[in-house]
Amino acid sequence: MNRDADSPLDEQFWTNRYLQGQTGWDIGYPSVPLQEYINQLSNKELKILIPGCGNAWEAAYLLEKGFNHITILDISKELVSRLKKHFAGQPVRIIHQDFFQHDEQYDLILEQTFFCALDPSLRRAYVQHMHSLLKPGGKLVGVLFNRSFEGGPPFGGSREEYELLFSSRFSIKKMELCYNSIPPRRDTELFFILQKNN
């Protein structure tokens, strides 16, 4: 569902999507590329952030794998209220906040359908803020759409565009076509690993 051109992608927009069940980006389980990345992480003490976390399937998967320094953040108060009930008593810090107002530092940030939800005019600010949220040597890891969309969100892009965008602040360790996307997204996603340039 595309938005009206004059409708801002603000908290009310996303809260309405959750209230109306219009969450087509939610596949109902953790992203397979991120599952496989998490599986090979040996340091369970990593401080991890998932911004624009949605229903936070990746956070649940991190818990299953023994990670306990997990922060999830979303702009929708309605969603955050649901998440607090869902994760009650578990070591997940849940924050209701605009990503661009968040001010802490992490070893690892996981990207899953957050970048594509932001208006493209915010992409340079996204790169700068992600850089500021990572500790020296920290990594931003996740999945980006390698295709265009009519209207948005989601908003798409290309590998060439992303490499140009991120290379000013990050070393691109990996940016390649996903071999393990879910069938509806096959051949339309890039898996990436970016390391903060200090």
Image (cartoon, helix red, strand yellow):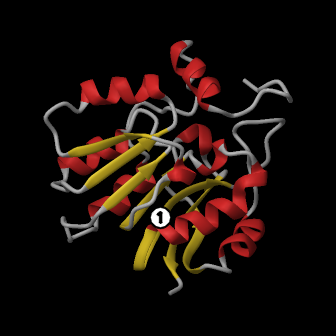
Image location (x, y in percent) of residue 72 = 37, 45
Neighbor class of circle 1 (other Cα within 10 Å; few <14, some 14-19, many 20+) is many
Q: Secondary structure at mark 1?
A: strand
Q: Quadrant of the N terminus?
A: top right
Which residue is nearer to you in this view: 30 or 73?
A: 73
Judging depth in this view, the residue of 194 and 11 nearest the camera is: 11
Q: Quadrant of residue 131?
A: bottom right
Residue pictured at 33% horizontal, 50% vertical:
71
Q: Quadrant of residue 146?
A: bottom right
Q: Which residue is mark 1?
A: 141
Name the residue located 50 percent from the left edge and 54 percent from the top edge.
111
Q: Residue at x 69, y 39 (%)?
A: 154
Classify 104 as above or below 13.
Answer: below
Most extreme residue toward the bottom, as rendered?
198
Residue 61 in view (yes/no):
yes
Against 8, residue 37 (above or below) is: below
Residue 59 in percent (x, y) is at: 31, 45
The answer to whether residue 192 of the structure is visible from this angle is: no
Percent across and percent down for residue 157 are 76, 55
Circle count: 1
Q: Above or below — where is 179 with respect to 52?
A: below
Foreground: 137 or 100? 100
Q: Position of residue 76 (x, y in %)?
A: 50, 30
